Image (tube, grey):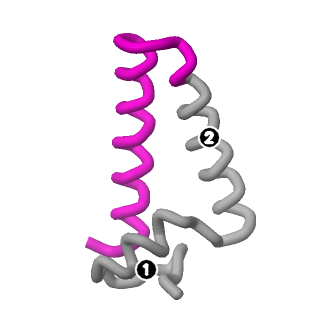
Amino acid sequence: MTLDRAVLVFAGIMVLLSVVLTWTVSVYFLWFTVFIGLNLIQSAFTGFCPAALVLGKLGFSTGCAFEAK
């Protein structure tokens, strides 16, 4: 699995987790969803993604969208 796909899987899991937490724990977990969305938007424009840095250090091979530095 490339780094690009791993980041997409991680983002999807985080969104689903935030929905479950919003439903079961508190409506304030919607802010977690907002944070994830804003992070995805800024990474589309800048190419910088903190999750890509972490996943790159875990050994995922780089794809064409993100580079682990």
In x, y percent, where is residue 66? 53, 76
In x, y percent, where is residue 34? 63, 33
Q: Residue type at mark 2: give it.
A: Phe
How would you classify the magenta stretch by its main secondary structure?
Answer: helix
Task: Classify residue 62 by image quadrant.
Answer: bottom left
Q: Which residues are magenta?
A: 1-29
Residue occupying the far bottom of the picture? 69
Q: Which residue is mark 1?
A: 63
Secondary structure beneath disc 1? Answer: loop
Determine crowd level at label 2: few under 14, some 14-19, many 20+ residues with C-alpha closer than 10 A. few
In what quadrant of the picture does the N terminus appear?
bottom left
Q: Nearer the viewer, residue 44 or 27?
A: 27
On screen, residue 41 above or below 28? below
Secondary structure beneath disc 2? Answer: helix
**Which mark is drawn over residue 38?**
none
Q: Nearer the viewer, residue 64 or 13?
A: 13
In x, y percent, where is residue 63? 43, 79
- Check residue 21 for magenta coloring: yes
Tag 2 or tag 1, which sits nearer the N-term?
Answer: 2
In the picture, measured across the screen, residue 37 lies left or right of residue 26, that is right
Q: Residue at x 40, y 12 (%)?
A: 23
Q: Which residue is mark 2?
A: 35
Q: Residue at x 34, y 42 (%)?
A: 13
- Check residue 34 for magenta coloring: no
